Image (cartoon, rainbow, N blue to C red):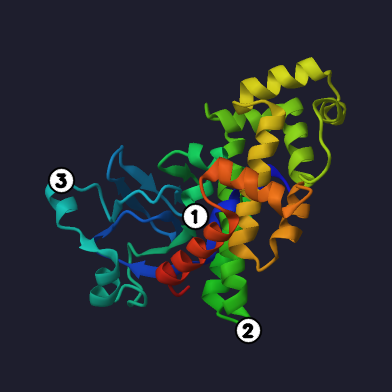
Amino acid sequence: MDVVSDAVSAVRVGRPSSNRVRVSGSWCTRLAPYDGAGFHVIMEGSCWLLPDSGSPVSLGAGDVVLLPHGTGHVIADAPADATTVKQAVPFERWLDDKGPRRPRATSGEVQMLCGKYRLDRSRMHPLMAELPKVVHLPNRVGAHPELRAAVDLLGHELGAQGPGACIAVPSLLDLLLVYMIRSWAAQGTSGTWSAVLGDPVAAAALRALHSDPAAPWTNDRLAAEAGVSRATLARRFTTLVGRPPMAYLTWWRLTFAATLLRDTPDPLAAIARRVGYGTPYALSHAFSREFGTTPGQYRAETAERSVSTDEPA
């Protein structure tokens, strides 16, 4: 595993949900704040996204936008004033009342994929927490080729509705999330984790820790893996990541344990071995100290929360 994969896996729960939308004319709809991440892919035409706080964003064909913190927003055919935004039709009712999924094709038609991912924010990796409220990835020639390929595949799959689509579409949506985050990191923004992933020393150390968190890591062994001295590793890693290498390892082991408790039926002893603790007692003690709850209580609470908040894909 790598940092981005693990950061996504730690928070992703359930299956993504999505709606293929076709609409034309004058329209304006609101998506309420959501305890997850929303996204829009503009397949054809253009529209505007107006977040609850922040500047309006113009979206064109091929553009992708991610709202990683579930920010409430309006999407509309044109920039809207405060009164129009206030009167925007809730998205679910808009789908039902206006029937925008399959209208007769007209000039000025907009086709888009609107959806959301369920996230467990209780153990969010700092890479995910650092993402801005709106991640806009414009369709530019030569930019983000993997993301563009995923968008094309998704558009084809949704249009064809061929055999196996019920498996292919959710898998492509998961792939889309990874590529959106990867593309954001590759933009070289001022974010801390863009710098972390672009630093050869910190990135090498993180790859090693995430590839095998159960290994008996020490600062010396990790420095050798990164190809630098122990002092250089400690200085660069701590400056960029915000905590020393071994402190990060401890935090990640326990976060990984929480993910396994949430997503698998594995016994505590097996989880302890996977995350680098010699005994279930040692893991339980560290887990309780870090998160203020026992592994058993955490597993029960997340299972109950998953049942109460589950929704169809």
Residue type at the position of mark 3: Ala
Q: Dot 3 corresponds to which residue?
A: 82
Q: Is residue 233 left or right of residue 136?
A: right
The answer to which image quadrant residue 75 occupies is: bottom left
Of callouts 2 and 1, the N-terminal one: 1
Question: Dot 3 lies on which element?
Answer: helix
Q: Dot 1 corresponds to which residue?
A: 120
Q: Nearer the viewer, mark 2 or mark 1?
A: 1
Q: Position of residue 42 (x, y in %)?
A: 44, 57
Residue at 45% in and 48% down: 68
Question: Dot 1 lies on which element?
Answer: loop
Of callouts 1 and 3, the N-terminal one: 3
Residue 163, label in figure: 2
Q: Position of residue 304 (x, y in %)?
A: 46, 68
Q: What separation in Å lies between label 1 and label 3 (alpha carbons)?
A: 32 Å
- In the image, residue 223 sits, relative to residue 257, either above or below, namely above
Q: Is residue 88 left or right of residue 32?
A: left
Camera-side residue: 284 or 31? 284
- In the image, residue 130 sits, relative to residue 211, either above or below, namely above
